[in-house]
């Protein structure tokens, strides 16, 4: 019977934890983007989305939502940013 060394157990555990936390970060960011998209879709109010996301310049929120610059400019003109 082969018994793993304490070092190999440690490194295996460390690798598993790093994978877990990287996935957790991805899912948290992804759900935050989804929430922002849903709020903007329902309200069409970029100022509200900016405040909820904690973004100062609206351009950050437009990038966060994945909007193209033409769409962002059109939306900004509509809501008078």
Image (cartoon, grey):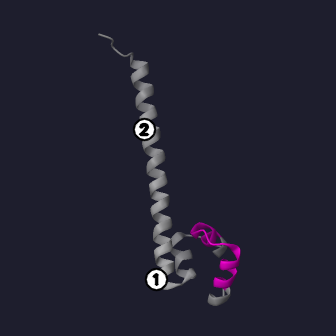
State which region is magenta.
60-76
Residue under the point 33% across and 11% down: 2
Element type at mark 2:
helix
Q: Position of residue 77 (x, y in %)?
A: 68, 87
Q: Position of residue 55 (x, y in %)?
A: 59, 70
Characterize the local packing of mark 2: few (<14), some (14-19) or many (20 or more) Cα atoms within 10 angstroms. Answer: few
Residue 61 within the segment the image draws in magenta: yes
Q: Is the stretch drawn in magenta largely helix, strand or loop?
A: helix
Is the C-beta separation of discs 1 and 2 under 8 Å?
no
Element type at mark 1:
helix
Q: Position of residue 69 (x, y in %)?
A: 70, 74
Characterize the local packing of mark 1: few (<14), some (14-19) or many (20 or more) Cα atoms within 10 angstroms. Answer: few
Residue sitting nearer the eye, 56 or 39: 39
Q: Looking at the rendering, which quadrant does residue 6 occupy?
A: top left
Between circles 1 and 2, the one closer to the viewer is 1
Residue 54 within the segment the image draws in magenta: no
- Who comes first in sequence, dot 1 or dot 2? 2
Residue under the point 57% across and 70% down: 65
Residue pointed to by mark 1? 42
Residue sitting nearer the eye, 57 or 76: 76
Residue under the point 47% across and 39% down: 18
Farthest residue in the top direction? 1
* Whether residue 14 is situated above or below residue 30 in the rendered picture: above
Locate the C terminus by quadrant.
bottom right
Residue pointed to by mark 2? 17
Residue under the point 45% across and 26% down: 11
For residue 4, side relative to residue 28 (left or right):
left
Locate the N terminus by quadrant.
top left
């Amino acid at each position: 019977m082969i018994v793993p060394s304490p070092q190999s157990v440690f490194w295996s555990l460390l690798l598993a934890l790093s994978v877990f936390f990287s996935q957790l970060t991805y899912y948290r960011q992804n759900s935050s983007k989804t929430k922002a998209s849903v709020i903007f879709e329902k309200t069409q109010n970029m100022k509200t989305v900016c405040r909820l996301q904690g973004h100062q310049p609206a351009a950050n929120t437009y990038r966060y939502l994945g909007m193209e610059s033409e769409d962002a400019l059109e939306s900004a003109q509509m809501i008078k940013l």
